Image: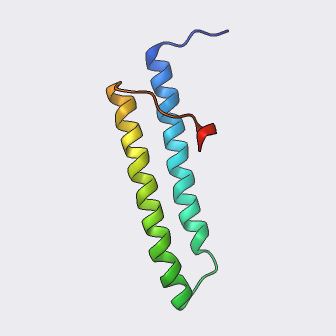
Amino acid sequence: MPTFTPNRIQARKLKELDDRTARAWGAYRDSLRDLAGRDYDDAEDRSWERLQRKLHELDAQRAEVVSGSGETRTSAEH
């Protein structure tokens, strides 16, 4: 079993957060695909708010990892 140093653990957690950020943007993009006009406008407002909440959550988790002030949740919890 490999031994992980704190820097490797931190790097792994930051990579996971980067992946989750990319997935959040992908979900935003996908939610608007093939929409036009009023349907797009309505969906975009909801999707943007959802994306902003998720990005805020991920930024807070990223700050915890960088500061070392706490453990982040694993992707299995999401």
- Compared across the picture, whether 5 is left or right of 33 comes to left
In the image, residue 2 lies at what x, y percent? 63, 10
- Compared across the picture, whether 9 is left or right of 52 comes to right
Quadrant housing residue 36: bottom right
Q: Give the position of the N terminus as an image quadrant.
A: top right
**Rendered view: 73 above or below 45:** above
Count of numbered marks:
0
Q: Residue furthest left?
A: 67
Quadrant housing residue 49: bottom left
Q: Residue at the spot x=49%, y=42% of the render?
A: 18
Q: Residue at the spot x=58%, y=61% of the render?
A: 27
Q: Residue furthest bottom?
A: 37
In the image, residue 69 lies at what x, y percent? 34, 26
Q: Residue at the spot x=47%, y=27% of the render?
A: 11
Q: Residue at the spot x=59%, y=70% of the render?
A: 31
In the image, residue 46 lies at what x, y percent? 48, 73
Q: Give the position of the C terminus as an image quadrant.
A: top right
**Rendered view: 35 above or below 52:** below
